[in-house]
Amino acid sequence: MKTPVLLSLSFLFVFITAPVRTNAEEVERPIILQFMIGEMVISNDDPRVSDGDYNITLFGVAAQKPFYGEMTLVGIETGGLFNWKSETRAYAASGGGGGTIAISADINQFLFDYFFGGYVSLQPLKWFRLYAGAGPLLIYGSREYEEKDPTTFQIETKSNSGFSGGMYGRAGIDIIISENFILGANIRGIKTGLSFNDTVGNVDVEGWQYFGVISFRF
């Protein structure tokens, strides 16, 4: 008697929960691939160097993969950003007669950071999405510069590089143009231990970054 009852209850359980499991499996949570271009200002606290702070342009790619939720999604994100910039600056140095002279320096700077963290997004409307993410990052930077002495016309090449860990946090908005195409913007803050302290400026690579974003969902 117990066996038929148990079989009946098992069948009823499977029958009731099968649609629930099927519906859960049918929920699609596509990956969002972001292409970003943005700006960052790196403060220079050395008054001897001309033109003040360093403005850099950043290019990057990021991906977000949701795992839980529907209107509100929770998942992981990862990506990378880089900058390559060449510019010429002058800095004040002591001259042979006790005064100061301006020395020209051609600077080549490279930065790359890789980040990985968690994120949450909210899509209250079909065409609008908000998201925020945070996590650790790894960053590498190098700076090479050629100094030209105006009195001797000699050129000296120097370099400086470093690697550091850090943290990031970012938040953004998306305007969903179509099911697979999105336009947006985000702001990102980073805190790292990477710094350059040399004759062409004393800078700490940290602060706020501002991006325009083109995204594809698939």
Image (cartoon, grey):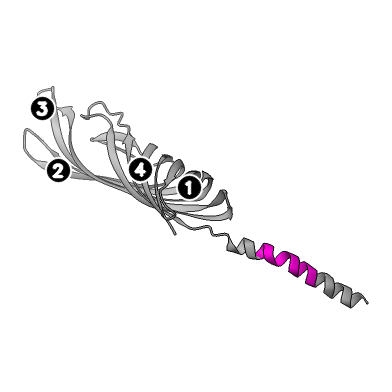
Please say if the residues under marks 2 and 4 sit with CB atoms less than 8 Å apart.
no
Reading the chain from its start, which is encountered first: label 3 or label 1? 3
In this rendering, the label closer to the viewer, 3 or 2: 2
| Image x and y of residue 158, in percent | 21, 44
Which range is magenta?
11-21
Would you say 62 lies left or right of 15 here? left
Q: Provide the residue designation for mark 3.
A: 96
| Residue 90 visible in the shown view | yes
* Crowd rating for badge 2 (residues with CA inside 10 Å; few <14, some 14–19, many 20+): few
Give SS at disc 1: strand
Q: Provide the residue designation for mark 2.
A: 156
Q: Provide the residue designation for mark 4.
A: 212
Please say if the residues under marks 3 and 2 sit with CB atoms less than 8 Å apart.
no
Q: Residue at x 13, y 22 (%)?
A: 99
In this rendering, the label closer to the viewer, 2 or 4: 4
Disc number placed over residue 136 in the picture, else none: 1
Reading the chain from its start, which is encountered first: label 3 or label 2? 3
Give SS at disc 3: loop
User: Which three-letter amino acid code belongs to the residue tagged 3?
Assistant: Gly
> Residue 57 lies in what quarter of the image?
top left
User: Which three-letter amino acid code belongs to the residue tagged 2?
Assistant: Glu
Residue furthest toward the left?
152
Would you say 185 lies left or right of 68 here? left
Q: Residue at x 46, y 46 (%)?
A: 127
